[in-house]
Amino acid sequence: MANVTALESIIATIPYTASGDDAFVNKVSFTPDEGLRSIFGGAISSQAISAAAATVTLDLDVYSSQSTYLHAAKLEENLVHRVERVADGRAYATRVVRSEQRGRCVYIAVIAFQRRSVGSPGPVLTYQVPMPAMDGLQPADVGGDEFLKHMKAGSPSLAKIHAGEPCEWRPAAVEQGDAPTKYRARGFFRSRTPLPRDRTTNIAALAYVSDKWLAATALNANPEAMGDRMGNLAMIASLTHTLSFHYPDVRVDEWLVAERETSWGADGRVMIHQKIWHVGTGRLSLDCTQEAVVRLKPAKL
């Protein structure tokens, strides 16, 4: 069985006392992810949330993270997250996190918190997009090795990496459609190992998972342009990653459903959208948008 790194350790940060107050550093060393030569973006954004949460009181929950990736972060170096306390109000707080390597900012995020309500908040609007029916499927109906089979067919090297993934993925449905904007991919996922019950850990874990293969949505929606086994792809990288957390008590070690689609592509960039629901409750737990750069190889004449 593969040696699975616990998701909790990947997203964890500790105080970086050598750099003053409100500075944090990754708790464990980074390892290659998805065949990348740089740190996986989801690891950076999840650690930024962990760092920001360490500067607010326990009754404040993360509800938003707006990220921009500035430079590739080197795997062999630690990542220092510097937190700026830009606002502390009665109901809301805001932090800006700048993640650095050797003094160079590689990532920046605005992370917002809302104070937990005590008692009834009064009249509020309450609604959501319902969870997809998933054709009646439950996680148990989709074999645990189906994703590995799918990846081995498309990319054997990625399949090897996936075998050590901290999360279990079970794809359930793909709608290709007659245009890239008609593409939909849905599947189940959860952490392979139990997570603590605290909200910050689970929100940070959800941020980590939300970025897994997300940019590939645009590639899968354009199979003809990508060619056999993505042979026409020259480069793909995340530019921005925006998260809206709707339920801070979400559990990432319980089954969740992700639905992914793409709405636009031009000028070397693509826009991807994702929604995540909790299977047990049907609650919409996350809305996510990502902008990525995609470059194709020149056509052979």
Image: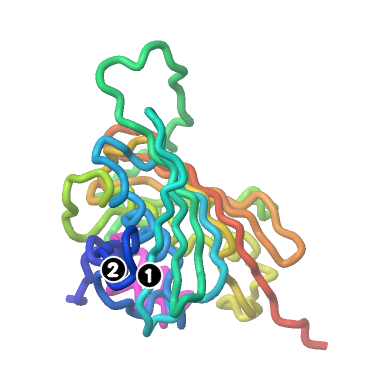
Characterize the local packing of mark 2: few (<14), some (14-19) or many (20 or more) Cα atoms within 10 angstroms: some
Kindly identify the residue that appears in the image at 30 percent across and 69 percent down: 26
Kindly identify the residue that appears in the image at 44 percent across and 31 percent down: 130
Residue 180 appearing in the image: yes
Image disc number at residue 16: 2
- Residue that mark 1 sits on: 80
Image disc number at residue 6: none
Residue 291 appears left or right of 20: right
Q: For the residue marked with disc 2, what is the amino acid?
A: Tyr
Q: Secondary structure at mark 2?
A: loop
Q: Are marks 2 and 1 in contact (CB under 8 Å)?
A: yes
**Quadrant in the picture for residue 68:** bottom right
Highlighted range, magenta: 146-169
Q: Main secondary structure of the magenta part?
A: helix
Residue 31 appears left or right of 127: left
Q: For the residue marked with disc 1, what is the amino acid?
A: Val
